[in-house]
Image: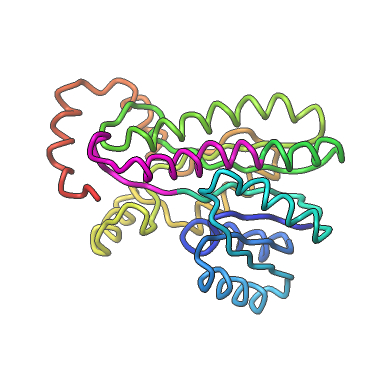
Amino acid sequence: MLSLVTGASRGIGIEYARTLARDYGSDLLIVSSHEADVQGVAADIAGDYGVNVIPLAMDLAQPDAAERLFAYTQEKGMEVDVLVNNAGMFFFNPLVDTDMARIERMLTLHVLTVTKLCRLFGEVMCRRGSGYILNMSSLSIWMAYPGIQVYNASKAYLYNFSRALWYEFKPKGVHVLVVTPGMVDTTLYGLKPELRALAVRLGINTPTPRLARKAVRRLFHRRKYCMPGIINHLFKPFLKHLPDWLVFFVIKKIAKYQK
């Protein structure tokens, strides 16, 4: 089995790669724009679990990245059994204060590249009659949140896109899972270490190994949806119906985390 994991040089991506190698004996093609990091991760996982791990440095926020990645696998004769679309980015800013290039990178990475990868690898999987695809959405899709308007809109796209693909691909033997985590214990949000530790203790932040194990398990159980963390299930109904005054209050309180 060969699994392709994007954004695999840090955070959740490393844990997806480790889970697939450790628990399922999968060989890996791991992709990241951070060349030194992805090479180090590949060496560590190969040494720890005795699987073949190929590191590939590639910026997936480029418009033609999906085609180049697919072409790479074809040239190398790789048959991808599992596609994990994990690569992502995050920023908190009012839209008019956000650089246009940053907006384009996020939309390309979250929407265009993932859509194209599902199209390219999905066609091969459907023709073969087997395969698994995991796409990362977010708990934030259940509300329109100022400051992360591009992020949660792009993640809402991924949620609906993935649910539609589940119906299209399932009759052809290919299974699509969409994951909607809440806060995850990574550096993505720019929180201080002590705040991250507190959030884990309170059950607000989900540790990355736990998230990866649960998501991959549900993927291979051929489910279509995964929301790790009981607290996230409790939050979901409230997020859909937050009063405007509370949203404005929260905006003021977290403005210092803008980056």
Q: Main secondary structure of the magenta part?
A: helix
- Is residue 92 one of those drawn in magenta? yes
> Relative to the observer, which residue lies in front, 133 or 75?
75
Quadrant where the N terminus is found in the figure = bottom right
- Front in this rendered view, residue 71 or 147: 71
Q: Is residue 252 left or right of residue 207?
A: left
Q: Quadrant of residue 25?
A: bottom right
> Which portion, as a residue range, is magenta?
89-117
**What residue occupies the far bottom of the structure in this picture?**
47
Residue nearest the viewer, comparing 67 with 240: 67
Q: Position of residue 193 (x, y in %)?
A: 27, 64
Residue drawn at x 52%, y 73% is 36
Q: Residue furthest right?
A: 128
Q: Residue at x 45, y 42 (%)?
A: 181
Q: Is residue 94 above or below residue 171?
A: below
Residue at 70% x, 55% y is: 3
Q: Position of residue 118 (x, y in %)?
A: 67, 38
Question: Within the magenta stretch, is there residue 162?
Answer: no
Residue 113 lies, in percent from the top left, at 58, 42
Left or right: where does residue 187 sit relative to residue 93? right
33 relative position to 84: left or right = left
Number of callouts: 0
What residue is rendered at 29% in x and 61% in y? Answer: 197
Asked which colour scheme the image uses, the reply is: rainbow
Residue 160: x and y, percent? 54, 26
User: Which image quarter: residue 164?
Assistant: top right
Quadrant assignment, res 232 = top left
- Taking 40 as reference, is 255 above or below it? above
